[in-house]
């Protein structure tokens, strides 16, 4: 186990070296003691003063912080997920007391109740006050602490929207309570559950039964993902589960994939521009951020329009391009293609010529745009 954790740390070091990691000791009135935390800020945090970021809270931060923070930094580097603020709480020597629950109601008691309030009322407040946070928060836990994170889900208005459960050691009644909470959820929730074929047998049996319960939930507000990793132990499954959970929670954030292109954009029953607009509205609404439409996603829609010959789509795409890439040739090109293919060659020619003085973008250059204008001029004798 130690060798695997060291390997994970070595693999993550080049990624983490580019992100800002801050180590703090913070006082807690709820716990009546100080607690050590680790905070990883996004790479561009200091440069983008107006930008806000989702927050990931990582319990068992003494060993879970680095793999979670590393994966978040890696995925956000490639724009598969939003950049995030990652906060790890060190619990070496305190995790069982922090996750304690009473044996009658199976709810947090003593230090468990104090730790519950510390996270929800002190730590999150401190992070929100000190850093530029959005309203989207996820929380991660492993065995005892995985059970603990679900107590927040049982509240009427949970402070977390995403729950990453790594081989949870659930309290009695917890499975039933979670199923009920997710079944009745009226706002979007993401729930991830993982075990492995070599997990602790008692935990694995309970997790598999729990998965069967969760699969019966019929609620569009809930996104649920389950993994049972072949050959993975209670500890090694963590390295496989973290990227899988992150991919699942932020699936809508990813750029348009080949699968999306072939199965959605090329279907004549789907408006590619409406799909693009709805995709980014979902990203902004779900994650509390303002995400500019990616150039590659514009190109995917452009190619879909060319393939399906739905030329009217270019009109709306041009407006969207003007909003997202003002001053470039992108909107001009889409507008010209619309005029060219809908029977207005002279207007198309003049629109292509309007690119002179605009910024080049993607494959669009002044020479390319003027050649398009000249080709129309030759064909029609203008």
Image (tube, helix red, strand yellow):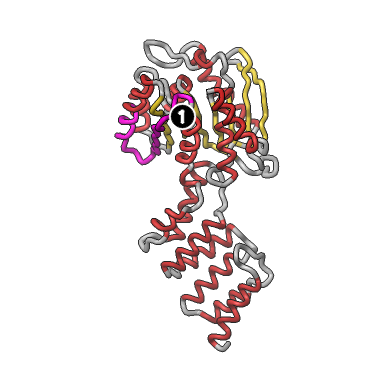
Quadrant of residue 361 within the rendered picture: bottom right
Q: Which residue is mark 1?
A: 237
Vertically, is 92 above or below 282? above
Residue 103: within the magenta?
A: no
Element type where label 1 sits in the image: helix
Q: State which region is magenta.
A: 210-235
Vertically, is 21 above or below 96? below
In this rendering, position of residue 283 left or right of residue 374: left
Q: Taking the image as drawn, is residue 177 in sight?
A: no
- Please tell me which residue is depicted at 67% across the width and 26% down the height of the picture: 23
- Please tell me which residue is depicted at 48% across the width and 25% down the height of the picture: 235
In this rendering, position of residue 351 left or right of residue 315: right
- Please tell me which residue is depicted at 50% across the width and 64% down the height of the picture: 302
Vertically, is 175 above or below 265? above
Q: Give the percent coordinates (x, y) of residue 90.
A: 59, 21
- Please tell me which residue is depicted at 34% across the width and 28% down the height of the picture: 208
């Amino acid at each position: 186990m130690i060798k695997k954790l060291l390997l994970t740390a070595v693999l993550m070091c080049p990624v983490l070296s580019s992100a800002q990691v801050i180590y703090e000791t913070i006082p807690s009135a709820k716990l009546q003691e100080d607690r050590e935390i680790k905070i990883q800020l996004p790479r561009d945090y200091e440069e983008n003063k107006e930008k806000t970021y989702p927050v990931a809270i990582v319990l068992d931060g003494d060993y879970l912080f680095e793999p979670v923070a590393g994966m978040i930094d890696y995925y956000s580097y490639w724009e598969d997920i939003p950049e995030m603020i990652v906060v790890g709480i060190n619990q070496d020597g305190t995790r069982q007391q922090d996750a304690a629950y009473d044996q009658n109601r199976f709810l947090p008691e003593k230090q468990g109740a104090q730790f519950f309030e510390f996270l929800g009322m002190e730590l999150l407040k401190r992070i929100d006050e000190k850093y530029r946070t959005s309203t989207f928060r996820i929380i991660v836990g492993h065995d005892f602490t995985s059970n603990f994170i679900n107590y927040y889900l049982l509240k009427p208005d949970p402070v977390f929207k995403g729950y990453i459960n790594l081989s949870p050691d659930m309290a009695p009644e917890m499975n039933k309570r979670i199923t009920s909470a997710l079944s009745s959820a009226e706002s979007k929730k993401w729930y991830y559950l993982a075990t492995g074929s070599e997990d602790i047998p008692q935990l694995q049996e309970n997790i598999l039964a729990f998965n069967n319960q969760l699969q019966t939930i019929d609620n569009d507000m809930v996104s649920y993902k389950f993994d049972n990793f072949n050959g993975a132990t209670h500890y090694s499954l963590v390295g496989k589960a973290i990227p899988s959970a992150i991919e699942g929670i932020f699936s809508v954030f990813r750029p348009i994939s080949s699968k999306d292109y072939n199965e959605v954009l090329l279907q004549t029953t789907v408006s590619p521009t409406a799909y693009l607009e709805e995709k980014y509205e979902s990203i902004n609404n779900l994650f509390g951020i303002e995400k500019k439409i990616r150039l590659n996603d514009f190109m995917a829609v452009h190619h879909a329009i060319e393939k399906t010959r739905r030329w009217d789509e270019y009109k709306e795409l041009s407006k969207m391009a003007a909003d997202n890439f003002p001053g470039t040739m992108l909107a001009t090109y889409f507008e010209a293609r619309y005029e060219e293919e809908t029977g207005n060659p002279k207007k198309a020619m003049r629109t292509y010529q309007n690119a002179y003085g605009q910024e080049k973008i993607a494959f669009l250059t002044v020479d390319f745009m003027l050649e398009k204008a000249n080709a129309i001029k030759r064909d029609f004798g203008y």
